Image (cartoon, helix red, strand yellow):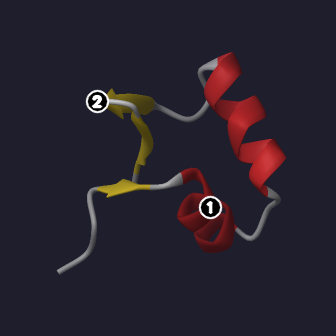
């Protein structure tokens, strides 16, 4: 089964981009993200 939520590092690997670019995309709203407690996850 595929994961529904990824860490920023996992998302960067899956998308073939750098981790800082993932954070930039989350900040601009182009990539959805959620906090689970203190852990940040991106929606796949």
Q: Is residue 40 above or below residue 13?
A: above
Dot label at residue 37? 2
Q: Which label lies toward us, 1 or 2? A: 2
User: In percent of the image, x 57 and y 60: which residue is there?
Assistant: 11
Residue ranking furthest to the left = 1
Residue ranking furthest to the front = 38
Residue ranking furthest to the bottom = 1
- 40 vs 8, left or right, is left
- 35 vs 42, left or right, is left
Between discs 1 and 2, the one toward the N terminus:
1
Quadrant where the N terminus sits is bottom left
Q: Is residue 16 above or below residue 6?
A: below
Do residues under tags 1 and 2 come within 8 Å of each other at their CB atoms? no
Dot label at residue 9? 1
Quadrant where the C terminus sits is bottom left
Image location (x, y in percent) of residue 13: 66, 72
Answer with the quarter of the image where residue 21 lies.
top right
User: In percent of the image, x 28 and y 30: which residue is there?
Assistant: 37
At label 1, counting other C-alpha atoms closer than 10 Å, the crowd grade (few under 14, some 14-19, many 20 or more) is: some
Q: Is residue 14 above or below residue 9?
A: below
Image location (x, y in percent) of residue 20: 82, 45
Image location (x, y in percent) of residue 10: 55, 66
- For the image, the number of numbered tags is 2
Asked which secondary structure carries label 2, the reply is loop
Asked which secondary structure carries label 1, the reply is helix
At label 2, counting other C-alpha atoms closer than 10 Å, the crowd grade (few under 14, some 14-19, many 20 or more) is: few
Could you tell me how far apart the alpha carbons at marks 1 and 2 are, in whole angstroms?
Answer: 18 Å
Answer with the quarter of the image where residue 41 lies.
top left
Dot label at residue 35? none
Answer with the quarter of the image where residue 9 lies.
bottom right
User: In percent of the image, x 67 and y 21: which residue is there?
Assistant: 27
Residue ranking furthest to the top = 28
């Amino acid at each position: 089964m595929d994961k529904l939520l990824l860490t920023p590092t996992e998302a960067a690997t899956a998308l073939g981009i750098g981790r800082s670019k993932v954070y930039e995309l989350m900040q601009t709203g182009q990539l959805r993200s959620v906090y689970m407690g203190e852990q940040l996850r991106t929606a796949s």
